[in-house]
Amino acid sequence: MEIFIQVVLPVFFVFIIGFTVQKWKKIDIKPVSTVAIYIMTPCLVFRTFYSSNLDIQSFYMVIFSIILLMSLIIINKVYAKIMNYNQSMESGMILSTAFMNAGNYGAPIILFAYGEQAFAYAVMFLVLQSIIMNCFGVYYAAKGKAGFGVAVKEVFKMPATYAVVVGLFLKLTSISLPDNLLVTVDIIAEAAIPTVMIILGMQLARIPWGGFEWGKVIYSTVIRLLLSPAIAYGITLLLPMDPLMAKVLIVSAAMPSAATIVMYAVQFDAHPKLVSSVTLVSTIISVITLTLLLIILG
């Protein structure tokens, strides 16, 4: 109960604030989201890569992400084959289960649970997940309507991509920025997480209730909240990871479906109703599953 009160509940309260304000005022999310995507998140990402020590653990994180993604894709393909689903439904289920909300949900949970060092790992993972979503997410959402070129363009539309490049370049060349410039970056970076948390609450408020395909929603929620962290745990046993990073990755793998992926499902008509309903249901149920997982991991 202490973990729920101190870690999960404060994060969920922020989502509720965003949810309530959106229901009340019907705010246009796009301008707020644009500020978060193009200003706040790049500053947070740049600060993380500029100040963090990149070592073999970063390579393990990449390997972890690839194995986890491939495992979830294969599971969905096998299940779709068994259930005799068409390719469109298979893609919809992959979208709703293979991509987790590592950014505006996972990062704050990890910060509250494990502290600043763990948060640095979480930010690296959210950047990695953003790249994966903009490649594989676009591919499965588009499936026949777009191709690899669209995915690549989406990656290069991400301001965070350039923040990673600049941060790594300055890190590797040992070029130091002036302290007053770093203070500016810090101020903006500190605003990133609470802003994207409120945005998630607002996004959830726009998802319509009712008419859910409950069989598919339950399956996808179980995969996302239970099987995904179980696979993640197995992967961390195979790789010689730092114990703290292993916890970060397991918790990140247990996050609900990514709200960002709903936009791709809508844009390419890849069963957006299913994807959005899984995002909503998995986010609500994650209050319980994440609390239990944090208790288990310690």
Image (tube, grey):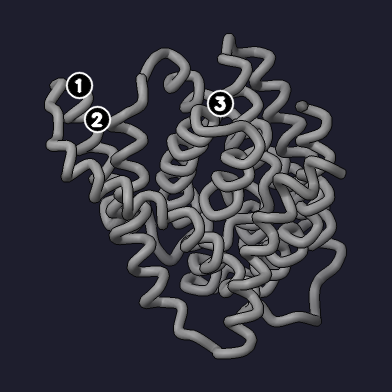
Q: Amino acid at mark 1?
A: Leu
- Say above or below: 105 vs 46: below
Q: Amino acid at mark 3?
A: Phe
Tell me where residue 194 appears, x and y as whole percent: 50, 58
First in residue order: circle 3 vs circle 2? 3
- Say above or below: 255 vs 19: above
Tell me where residue 269 appears, x and y as whole percent: 54, 73
Please state which of the two labelled residues, at mark 1 or mark 3, is closer to the viewer.
Answer: 1
Q: CA distance from mark 3 to mark 2?
A: 21 Å
* Left or right position of 181 against 83: left
Tell me where residue 105 appears, x and y as whole percent: 60, 52
Quadrant of the rendered image containing residue 83? bottom right
Q: Amino acid at mark 2?
A: Leu
Label 1 element class:
helix
First in residue order: circle 1 vs circle 3? 3
Camera-nearest residue between 140 and 298: 298
The crowding category of the residue bearing disc 1, from other C-alpha atoms within 10 Å (few below 14, some 14 to 19, many at least 20), is few
Answer yes or no: is residue 140 visible.
yes
Asked whether the residues under the numbered discs 2 and 1 touch, taking CB atoms below 8 Å apart as contact, a structural biologist would say yes
Asked whether the residues under the numbered discs 1 and 3 touch, taking CB atoms below 8 Å apart as contact, a structural biologist would say no
Label 3 element class:
helix
The label number, if any, that marks residue 172 in the structure image: 1
Identify the residue under disc 3.
64
Camera-nearest residue between 93 and 196: 196
Label 2 element class:
helix
- Say above or below: 251 vs 29: above
> Residue visible at 45% across and 57% down?
138
Q: CA distance from mark 2 to mark 1?
A: 6 Å
The crowding category of the residue bearing disc 3, from other C-alpha atoms within 10 Å (few below 14, some 14 to 19, many at least 20), is some
Quadrant of the frame with the C terminus: top right
> Residue visible at 57% across and 68% down?
270
The label number, if any, that marks residue 168 in the structure image: 2
